[in-house]
Image (cartoon, grey):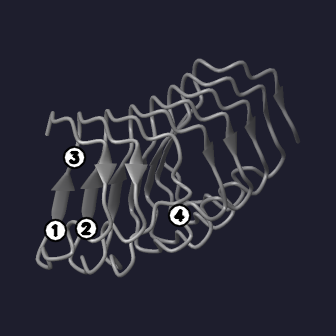
Amino acid sequence: STNKLEIIKSNYFSILVNLINLYLNHNQVRIIEEFSFFNLKKLTRIELENNQINNLNNFTLNEANNLKDLFFSKNTIQKITRDTFEKFNKLESIYLNENQIIFIEEYSFRNLISLKNLVLYQNHIEILNQNIFHEAINLIYLNVNKNKVKKIENQLFCNLTKLRTLDLSENEINTIEE
């Protein structure tokens, strides 16, 4: 990578029907147009680390049904909504560390029944609402280190029975509700 790419245009990669891994790290990507990854049915991994992406709401992977790993570390993403990952039900790993995430909407990780690794460290997250991880039932690794979380709500982790590693260190937690 390490180019000066700023916009990923629609259908730009659509001819690469056998593409499995796509690395666009260390660019200046700000915009990912709709249908940018159209027709990439074999794509399993996208890395867009160290770019200038601040919004994932328009991020769509039409027909990229086999996507397993998303790397968006070191961007300027500020929020995650319930629609952000809605159509990516085969995702196993999401890396959103070192962004500027302040807010994660409830049910943001719904339909992600294959999700095993979620990395959110070094953001600005203050609140982890009760239903954020509600359907992420196969989560094994969750890192929320170096955020600004002040309290852990009751039942936040109740469906995460497979969780093996939970990192909440270097936050501002003063309350764990019963």
Q: Which residue is mark 3?
A: 24
Vertical placement of residue 91 versus 103, above or below: below
Q: Quadrant of residue 175?
A: top right
Q: Residue furthest right?
A: 178
Q: Nearer the viewer, residue 106 or 50?
A: 50
Q: Quadrant of the C terminus?
A: top right
How many numbered tags mark residues here? 4
Q: Secondary structure at mark 2?
A: loop
Q: CA distance from mark 4 to mark 1?
A: 19 Å
Q: Secondary structure at mark 1?
A: loop
Q: Quadrant of residue 69?
A: bottom left
Q: Are marks 4 and 2 in contact (CB under 8 Å)?
A: no
Q: Residue at x 81, y 20 (%)?
A: 174
Does label 2 or label 1 sit earlier along the sequence? 1
Q: Which residue is mark 2?
A: 44
Number of the front mark, 3 or 2? 3
Q: CA distance from mark 3 to mark 2?
A: 14 Å
Does label 3 or label 4 sit earlier along the sequence? 3
Q: Residue at x 56, y 70 (%)?
A: 86
Q: Which residue is mark 4?
A: 85
Q: Which mark is residue 20?
A: 1
Q: Are marks 3 and 4 in contact (CB under 8 Å)?
A: no
Q: Are marks 2 and 1 in contact (CB under 8 Å)?
A: yes
Give the class, few, some or many, for how many residues have Cα within 10 Å of label 4's Cα (few <14, many ≥20): many
Q: Amino acid at mark 1?
A: Ile
Q: Nearer the viewer, residue 169 or 25?
A: 25
Q: CA distance from mark 3 to mark 4?
A: 19 Å
- 94 lies left or right of 152: left
